[in-house]
Amino acid sequence: ELYQFGPLLAGIDSDIRYKLPSMIESLELEMAKYKNEKSEEKDKESESLSDQEKKAMHDEKMVKKRQLAQLHKKWKLLQKMYCECIPITNNGAFDLYLQFKWQHNGCGEYRTNSDDGDDKATKSAPPKRPDAKKTALVYFVEPSTLQISKGDTKEFKIWCFPSFEGIFRDVLECEIANNPSPMKLTFE
């Protein structure tokens, strides 16, 4: 089976999948702290704060609220474009232990957009990657292992972050404990 991500913007830092949720969490904590402090101190300080100070606090809260909304919007867009959630249901009689591995270590086989898959292209040497000296990871799987109890459903995520223009293909091997044949999913 082949899953195609479709056209993606090249050069987006793959660490954004960690940085953005961290930024959201920090801002949410600030907002919660701000709300708690405001409710506790409201009675005490409401009389001592000038209208200008109250307005400044309100404006600061509104700026943070807008920033948080923008970060949530970016996160949803990032997940929609660069991530695929794949559910797995264990219908078997035993618990499953799965381990995910990329056939090409997540770097993917590379071909240019101009390669159309005809016989001439496959007989010639594959094109040289622009990152040949230090091959960049393109595909990421999270988590790398998964344990699913019988009757349960869990999901894993596939992220795709190409660092330059081209077509990248990699095969995700899902090794199932005590099963000699891994399940394979191809991503492009």
Image: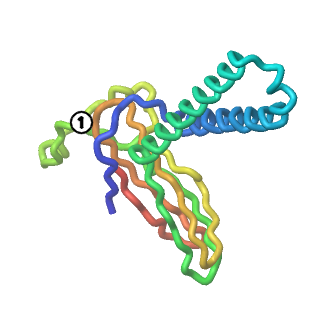
Residue visible at 18% across and 40% down in the picture = 115
- Depth check: give the residue in front, 39 or 174: 39
Residue visible at 13% across and 48% down in the picture = 118
- Residue 165 lies, in percent from the top left, at 29, 32
Q: Is residue 105 visible?
A: no
- Depth check: give the residue in front, 10 or 27: 27
Depicted 49 relative to depicted 39: above or below: above
SS at badge 1: loop
Q: Is residue 138 left or right of residue 147?
A: left
Q: Residue furthest bottom?
A: 93
- In this rendering, the count of numbered labels is 1
- Residue 156 lies, in percent from the top left, at 53, 57
Q: Is residue 182 visible?
A: yes
Q: Residue furthest right?
A: 44
- Depth check: give the residue in front, 33 or 93: 33
- Depth check: give the residue in front, 167 or 118: 167
Q: Is residue 72 left or right of residue 117?
A: right
Q: Which residue was labeled with disc 1?
A: 112
Which quadrant holds the N terminus? bottom left
Q: Amino acid at mark 1?
A: Thr
